[in-house]
Image: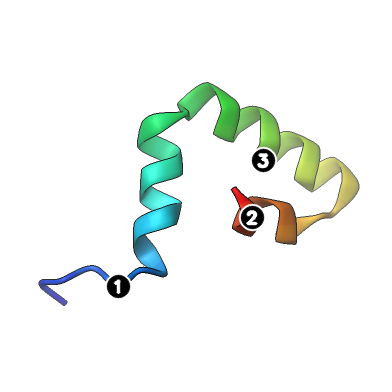
Amino acid sequence: MTKPTKRAVPAMAVRVHNLADAQAVAQAAQSASAAPRLDVL
């Protein structure tokens, strides 16, 4: 688990790069129940 896979990179990158955007998207996704949108980001 030393080398992060590409699947784990995007999630962490999104949180680190756009914390405010990620929070807003997460709230909108939860409200609309659209988990796929988080994956797209």
Residue wearing tag 3: 26
Residue 40 badge: 2
**Label 1: few (<14), some or many (≥20) within 10 Å?**
few
First-in-chain label (2 vs 1): 1
Residue 33 x, y percent position in the rendering: 85, 54
Residue located at (47% from left, 28% from top): 19
First-in-chain label (3 vs 1): 1
Residue located at (61% from left, 59% from top): 39
Q: On the picture, is 19 further left or further right than 33?
A: left
Alpha-carbon span between mark 2 and mark 3: 12 Å
Alpha-carbon span between mark 3 and mark 1: 22 Å
Q: Secondary structure at mark 3?
A: helix
**Label 2: few (<14), some or many (≥20) within 10 Å?**
few
| Amino acid type assigned to the residue bearing label 2 in the image | Val
**Label 3: few (<14), some or many (≥20) within 10 Å?**
some
Q: Nearer the viewer, mark 2 or mark 3?
A: 2
Q: Does residue 35 lie above or below 18 as drawn?
A: below
**Whether label 2 touches label 3, CB < 8 Å:** no
Residue located at (72% from left, 52% from top): 37
Residue 38 x, y percent position in the rendering: 64, 52
Q: On the picture, is 13 further left or further right than 22?
A: left
| Amino acid type assigned to the residue bearing label 1 in the image | Thr
Alpha-carbon span between mark 2 and mark 1: 17 Å
Q: Does residue 34 lie above or below 17 as drawn?
A: below
| Amino acid type assigned to the residue bearing label 3 in the image | Ala
Residue 12 x, y percent position in the rendering: 37, 49
First-in-chain label (2 vs 3): 3
Residue located at (30% from left, 72% from top): 5
Q: Assign the N terminus to one quadrant of the image.
A: bottom left
Q: Quadrant of residue 35?
A: bottom right
Residue wearing tag 1: 5
